[in-house]
Image (cartoon, rainbow, N blue to C red):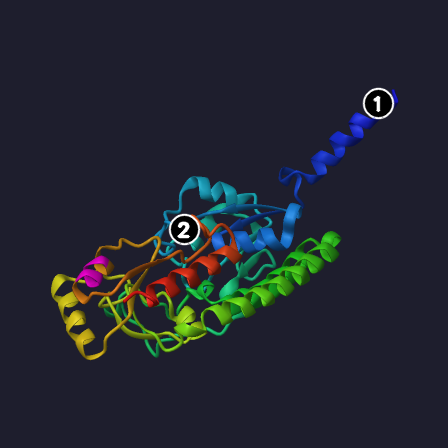
Amino acid sequence: MKFHRYLLALCAAAAFASPAQAALRVFACEPEWGALTQALGGNLVDVTVATSALQDPHQIQAKPSLIARMRNADLVVCTGAELEVGWLPVLVQQSANAKVQPGQPGFFEAARNVRLQDIPGSVDRSQGDVHAAGNPHIQTDPRNIASVATALGARLAQIDAANAAQYQQRTADFSQKWQQAMAKWNAQAAPLRGTPVVSQHKGFVYLYDWLGLKEVAVLEPKPGVEPSASYLQNVLATLKASPAKMVLFAAYQDPRASDWMSQNAGIPAVKIPFTVGGSEQAKDLFTLFDDTIARLLAAAQRK
Protein backbone atom coordinates (compact mmCIF):
# COMPACT_ATOMS: atom_id res chain seq x y z
CA MET A 1 0.00 0.00 0.00
CA LYS A 2 2.84 2.39 0.91
CA PHE A 3 4.54 1.67 -2.42
CA HIS A 4 1.26 2.31 -4.25
CA ARG A 5 0.87 5.72 -2.56
CA TYR A 6 4.52 6.49 -3.44
CA LEU A 7 3.83 5.80 -7.12
CA LEU A 8 0.74 8.03 -7.04
CA ALA A 9 2.79 10.84 -5.51
CA LEU A 10 5.47 10.48 -8.22
CA CYS A 11 2.82 10.60 -10.95
CA ALA A 12 1.30 13.74 -9.43
CA ALA A 13 4.68 15.43 -9.25
CA ALA A 14 5.47 14.50 -12.86
CA ALA A 15 2.14 15.88 -14.04
CA PHE A 16 2.77 19.19 -12.27
CA ALA A 17 6.18 19.54 -13.90
CA SER A 18 4.94 18.72 -17.41
CA PRO A 19 4.61 21.63 -19.87
CA ALA A 20 1.20 20.20 -20.74
CA GLN A 21 0.15 21.12 -17.20
CA ALA A 22 1.87 24.53 -17.27
CA ALA A 23 0.10 27.45 -15.63
CA LEU A 24 0.12 29.59 -18.79
CA ARG A 25 -0.33 28.73 -22.47
CA VAL A 26 1.64 31.27 -24.50
CA PHE A 27 1.41 32.03 -28.23
CA ALA A 28 4.62 33.70 -29.45
CA CYS A 29 4.72 35.24 -32.93
CA GLU A 30 8.49 34.97 -33.48
CA PRO A 31 11.19 32.58 -32.19
CA GLU A 32 13.00 35.24 -30.14
CA TRP A 33 9.90 35.95 -28.04
CA GLY A 34 9.18 32.25 -27.65
CA ALA A 35 12.72 31.72 -26.36
CA LEU A 36 12.49 34.70 -24.00
CA THR A 37 9.13 33.60 -22.61
CA GLN A 38 10.49 30.10 -22.02
CA ALA A 39 13.55 31.51 -20.26
CA LEU A 40 11.40 33.64 -17.95
CA GLY A 41 8.64 31.10 -17.37
CA GLY A 42 10.40 27.73 -17.28
CA ASN A 43 7.99 24.88 -16.58
CA LEU A 44 5.24 27.36 -15.74
CA VAL A 45 4.67 28.16 -19.42
CA ASP A 46 3.73 26.08 -22.45
CA VAL A 47 4.99 28.07 -25.44
CA THR A 48 3.83 27.76 -29.05
CA VAL A 49 5.82 29.69 -31.67
CA ALA A 50 3.91 30.70 -34.81
CA THR A 51 6.89 31.19 -37.14
CA SER A 52 10.37 29.83 -37.72
CA ALA A 53 13.65 31.64 -38.30
CA LEU A 54 13.46 30.73 -41.99
CA GLN A 55 10.13 32.47 -42.53
CA ASP A 56 9.64 36.14 -43.37
CA PRO A 57 7.68 37.43 -40.35
CA HIS A 58 6.01 40.04 -42.58
CA GLN A 59 4.47 37.37 -44.80
CA ILE A 60 2.76 34.70 -42.69
CA GLN A 61 -0.52 33.04 -43.67
CA ALA A 62 -3.26 33.14 -41.01
CA LYS A 63 -3.87 29.39 -41.14
CA PRO A 64 -6.65 27.63 -39.17
CA SER A 65 -4.01 25.76 -37.15
CA LEU A 66 -2.64 29.08 -35.85
CA ILE A 67 -6.14 30.32 -35.04
CA ALA A 68 -6.75 27.15 -33.04
CA ARG A 69 -3.56 27.67 -31.05
CA MET A 70 -4.45 31.28 -30.30
CA ARG A 71 -7.95 30.28 -29.24
CA ASN A 72 -6.45 28.37 -26.30
CA ALA A 73 -3.76 30.91 -25.34
CA ASP A 74 -3.58 32.82 -22.06
CA LEU A 75 -0.96 35.22 -23.42
CA VAL A 76 0.13 36.39 -26.88
CA VAL A 77 3.71 37.72 -27.19
CA CYS A 78 4.56 39.42 -30.48
CA THR A 79 6.86 42.14 -31.80
CA GLY A 80 4.18 44.69 -32.69
CA ALA A 81 5.14 47.93 -34.50
CA GLU A 82 3.11 46.56 -37.44
CA LEU A 83 5.53 43.69 -38.15
CA GLU A 84 2.64 41.20 -38.02
CA VAL A 85 -0.01 43.58 -39.39
CA GLY A 86 -0.74 41.27 -42.33
CA TRP A 87 -1.74 38.25 -40.24
CA LEU A 88 -1.89 38.78 -36.47
CA PRO A 89 -5.12 40.86 -36.41
CA VAL A 90 -6.87 38.08 -38.35
CA LEU A 91 -5.70 35.45 -35.88
CA VAL A 92 -6.75 37.51 -32.87
CA GLN A 93 -10.17 38.25 -34.31
CA GLN A 94 -10.86 34.73 -35.57
CA SER A 95 -9.75 33.17 -32.28
CA ALA A 96 -12.59 34.96 -30.41
CA ASN A 97 -10.37 34.63 -27.33
CA ALA A 98 -11.29 37.54 -25.04
CA LYS A 99 -8.08 37.13 -23.00
CA VAL A 100 -5.73 38.00 -25.86
CA GLN A 101 -7.50 40.90 -27.53
CA PRO A 102 -5.46 44.16 -27.90
CA GLY A 103 -5.57 46.17 -24.69
CA GLN A 104 -6.01 43.09 -22.50
CA PRO A 105 -3.20 41.83 -20.19
CA GLY A 106 -2.94 38.73 -22.40
CA PHE A 107 -1.77 40.78 -25.40
CA PHE A 108 1.90 41.78 -25.14
CA GLU A 109 3.81 43.75 -27.80
CA ALA A 110 7.58 43.79 -27.29
CA ALA A 111 8.16 46.92 -29.39
CA ARG A 112 6.20 49.04 -26.90
CA ASN A 113 9.08 48.60 -24.44
CA VAL A 114 11.94 49.97 -26.56
CA ARG A 115 12.81 53.16 -28.42
CA LEU A 116 11.87 52.59 -32.05
CA GLN A 117 14.04 53.86 -34.92
CA ASP A 118 13.33 54.73 -38.57
CA ILE A 119 9.97 56.34 -37.79
CA PRO A 120 8.84 57.91 -41.09
CA GLY A 121 7.36 61.38 -41.27
CA SER A 122 4.65 60.12 -43.63
CA VAL A 123 3.76 56.78 -45.24
CA ASP A 124 2.17 55.83 -48.55
CA ARG A 125 2.16 52.72 -50.74
CA SER A 126 4.79 54.16 -53.10
CA GLN A 127 7.42 53.79 -50.35
CA GLY A 128 7.18 49.98 -50.26
CA ASP A 129 6.74 47.95 -47.05
CA VAL A 130 7.37 50.85 -44.65
CA HIS A 131 6.13 50.59 -41.05
CA ALA A 132 4.50 53.79 -39.81
CA ALA A 133 5.33 52.93 -36.18
CA GLY A 134 9.05 52.57 -36.92
CA ASN A 135 11.45 49.74 -37.74
CA PRO A 136 10.12 46.59 -36.01
CA HIS A 137 13.29 44.43 -36.07
CA ILE A 138 14.17 45.25 -32.47
CA GLN A 139 15.50 41.78 -31.59
CA THR A 140 18.90 42.43 -33.22
CA ASP A 141 19.98 44.63 -30.28
CA PRO A 142 20.49 42.80 -26.94
CA ARG A 143 19.75 46.02 -25.06
CA ASN A 144 16.22 45.78 -26.44
CA ILE A 145 15.98 42.15 -25.31
CA ALA A 146 16.88 43.32 -21.78
CA SER A 147 14.10 45.92 -21.76
CA VAL A 148 11.54 43.49 -23.13
CA ALA A 149 12.55 40.82 -20.59
CA THR A 150 11.82 43.15 -17.69
CA ALA A 151 8.40 44.06 -19.08
CA LEU A 152 7.51 40.50 -20.08
CA GLY A 153 8.52 39.10 -16.69
CA ALA A 154 6.19 41.60 -15.03
CA ARG A 155 3.37 40.66 -17.39
CA LEU A 156 3.78 36.94 -16.65
CA ALA A 157 3.62 37.70 -12.93
CA GLN A 158 0.50 39.83 -13.46
CA ILE A 159 -1.39 37.19 -15.42
CA ASP A 160 -0.36 34.26 -13.23
CA ALA A 161 -0.31 35.95 -9.82
CA ALA A 162 -0.18 32.65 -7.94
CA ASN A 163 3.32 32.06 -9.35
CA ALA A 164 4.46 35.71 -9.43
CA ALA A 165 7.43 35.12 -7.15
CA GLN A 166 8.82 32.45 -9.46
CA TYR A 167 8.54 34.68 -12.55
CA GLN A 168 10.19 37.54 -10.67
CA GLN A 169 13.08 35.35 -9.59
CA ARG A 170 13.58 33.88 -13.07
CA THR A 171 13.46 37.38 -14.60
CA ALA A 172 16.09 38.62 -12.13
CA ASP A 173 18.31 35.62 -12.87
CA PHE A 174 17.95 36.07 -16.63
CA SER A 175 18.68 39.82 -16.42
CA GLN A 176 21.85 39.23 -14.43
CA LYS A 177 23.16 36.65 -16.92
CA TRP A 178 22.12 38.87 -19.84
CA GLN A 179 24.05 41.86 -18.51
CA GLN A 180 27.16 39.70 -18.13
CA ALA A 181 26.74 38.40 -21.67
CA MET A 182 26.32 41.91 -23.07
CA ALA A 183 29.57 42.99 -21.43
CA LYS A 184 31.31 40.06 -23.15
CA TRP A 185 29.72 40.84 -26.55
CA ASN A 186 30.59 44.53 -26.28
CA ALA A 187 34.25 43.68 -25.70
CA GLN A 188 34.36 41.09 -28.49
CA ALA A 189 32.69 43.40 -31.02
CA ALA A 190 34.75 46.52 -30.28
CA PRO A 191 36.87 46.08 -33.47
CA LEU A 192 33.67 46.31 -35.56
CA ARG A 193 32.90 49.89 -34.57
CA GLY A 194 32.81 52.17 -37.62
CA THR A 195 32.87 49.28 -40.12
CA PRO A 196 31.01 50.22 -43.35
CA VAL A 197 28.41 47.63 -44.41
CA VAL A 198 25.69 47.03 -47.01
CA SER A 199 22.27 45.62 -46.03
CA GLN A 200 20.08 43.52 -48.29
CA HIS A 201 16.95 44.62 -46.34
CA LYS A 202 16.74 47.47 -43.87
CA GLY A 203 16.43 45.02 -41.00
CA PHE A 204 19.58 45.68 -38.98
CA VAL A 205 19.27 49.29 -37.80
CA TYR A 206 19.24 48.24 -34.13
CA LEU A 207 22.22 45.92 -34.61
CA TYR A 208 24.15 48.76 -36.27
CA ASP A 209 23.18 51.22 -33.53
CA TRP A 210 24.43 48.80 -30.87
CA LEU A 211 27.72 47.90 -32.55
CA GLY A 212 28.47 51.22 -34.25
CA LEU A 213 28.39 49.75 -37.77
CA LYS A 214 27.91 52.22 -40.64
CA GLU A 215 25.32 51.34 -43.30
CA VAL A 216 26.51 52.81 -46.62
CA ALA A 217 23.94 51.17 -48.95
CA VAL A 218 20.80 48.99 -49.03
CA LEU A 219 20.18 46.51 -51.85
CA GLU A 220 16.38 46.79 -51.80
CA PRO A 221 15.27 49.97 -53.62
CA LYS A 222 12.31 50.11 -51.20
CA PRO A 223 11.60 47.95 -48.14
CA GLY A 224 10.33 44.54 -49.26
CA VAL A 225 11.00 45.21 -52.98
CA GLU A 226 13.52 42.95 -54.73
CA PRO A 227 16.31 44.91 -56.52
CA SER A 228 16.54 44.81 -60.31
CA ALA A 229 19.83 44.16 -62.11
CA SER A 230 20.13 47.84 -63.01
CA TYR A 231 19.50 48.89 -59.41
CA LEU A 232 22.23 46.55 -58.16
CA GLN A 233 24.59 48.05 -60.75
CA ASN A 234 23.80 51.52 -59.35
CA VAL A 235 24.53 50.34 -55.78
CA LEU A 236 27.79 48.79 -56.99
CA ALA A 237 28.77 52.14 -58.51
CA THR A 238 28.13 53.96 -55.22
CA LEU A 239 30.37 51.48 -53.39
CA LYS A 240 33.34 52.65 -55.46
CA ALA A 241 33.02 56.03 -53.74
CA SER A 242 31.99 54.58 -50.35
CA PRO A 243 33.46 51.06 -50.08
CA ALA A 244 31.95 48.52 -47.70
CA LYS A 245 33.55 45.61 -45.85
CA MET A 246 30.61 43.18 -46.13
CA VAL A 247 26.99 42.75 -47.21
CA LEU A 248 24.47 41.41 -44.66
CA PHE A 249 21.31 39.39 -45.20
CA ALA A 250 18.98 37.60 -42.78
CA ALA A 251 18.65 33.80 -42.65
CA TYR A 252 15.08 33.90 -43.99
CA GLN A 253 16.00 35.95 -47.06
CA ASP A 254 16.87 34.78 -50.57
CA PRO A 255 20.64 35.53 -50.71
CA ARG A 256 20.92 36.04 -54.48
CA ALA A 257 21.13 39.84 -54.32
CA SER A 258 23.77 39.69 -51.58
CA ASP A 259 25.69 36.99 -53.42
CA TRP A 260 25.71 39.11 -56.60
CA MET A 261 27.03 42.13 -54.70
CA SER A 262 29.60 39.96 -52.93
CA GLN A 263 30.98 38.62 -56.21
CA ASN A 264 31.01 41.97 -58.01
CA ALA A 265 32.20 44.20 -55.14
CA GLY A 266 34.69 41.67 -53.80
CA ILE A 267 33.28 41.73 -50.27
CA PRO A 268 31.93 38.82 -48.17
CA ALA A 269 28.19 38.14 -47.92
CA VAL A 270 27.28 37.44 -44.29
CA LYS A 271 24.18 35.49 -43.31
CA ILE A 272 22.92 36.84 -39.97
CA PRO A 273 20.78 34.33 -37.99
CA PHE A 274 18.42 37.21 -37.13
CA THR A 275 16.54 35.15 -34.54
CA VAL A 276 16.76 31.93 -32.55
CA GLY A 277 17.09 29.00 -34.98
CA GLY A 278 18.52 31.14 -37.79
CA SER A 279 21.72 29.11 -37.77
CA GLU A 280 22.86 25.81 -36.34
CA GLN A 281 24.67 27.69 -33.57
CA ALA A 282 21.82 30.06 -32.62
CA LYS A 283 19.95 27.63 -30.38
CA ASP A 284 18.82 30.23 -27.80
CA LEU A 285 19.05 33.98 -27.24
CA PHE A 286 22.59 33.80 -25.86
CA THR A 287 24.01 31.73 -28.70
CA LEU A 288 22.09 33.90 -31.18
CA PHE A 289 24.31 36.86 -30.29
CA ASP A 290 27.41 34.68 -29.87
CA ASP A 291 26.98 33.52 -33.46
CA THR A 292 26.08 36.97 -34.83
CA ILE A 293 29.25 38.53 -33.39
CA ALA A 294 31.40 35.63 -34.58
CA ARG A 295 30.12 35.92 -38.15
CA LEU A 296 30.67 39.70 -38.28
CA LEU A 297 34.18 39.45 -36.88
CA ALA A 298 35.12 36.68 -39.32
CA ALA A 299 33.90 38.78 -42.27
CA ALA A 300 35.67 41.93 -41.05
CA GLN A 301 38.98 40.06 -40.80
CA ARG A 302 38.89 38.82 -44.40
CA LYS A 303 41.33 40.52 -46.76
Above or below residue 127? Residue 157 is: above
What residue does disc 1 label? 3
Is residue 265 toward the left or the right of residue 95 in the image?
left
What residue does disc 2 label? 279
Q: Name the one closer to the observer, 26 or 2.
A: 2
Q: Residues within 10 Å of mark 1 (few under 14, many from 20)?
A: few
Asked whether residue 263 is in view, the answer is yes
Q: CA distance from mark 2 to mark 1?
A: 48 Å
Q: Is 222 part of what is drawn in magenta?
A: no
Identify the residue shown where x is 43% and y is 40%.
64
Q: Quadrant of the N terminus?
A: top right
Predominant SS along the magenta part: helix
* Tag in front: 2 or 1: 2
Identify the residue shown where x is 33% and y is 64%.
299
Is residue 122 toward the left or the right of residue 93 in the image?
left
Q: At label 2, which amino acid type do we have?
A: Ser
Asked whether residue 134 is in view, the answer is no
Q: Quadrant of the C terminus?
A: bottom left
Q: Quadrant of residue 120?
A: bottom left
x and y, in percent, of residue 154 in the image: 65, 62
x and y, in percent, of residue 228 in the image: 15, 62
Marks 2 & 1, CB-CB < 8 Å contact: no
x and y, in percent, of residue 68 in the image: 49, 41
Q: Residue furthest left?
A: 230
Q: Residue furthest top?
A: 1
Q: Residue furthest front?
A: 303
Q: Name the one closer to the observer, 45 or 244.
A: 244
Q: Name the one closer to the observer, 97 or 45.
A: 45
Give, as a single range, the part of the protein colored magenta: 259-263
Q: Quadrant of residue 178?
A: bottom right
Is residue 286 toward the left or the right of residue 87 in the image?
right
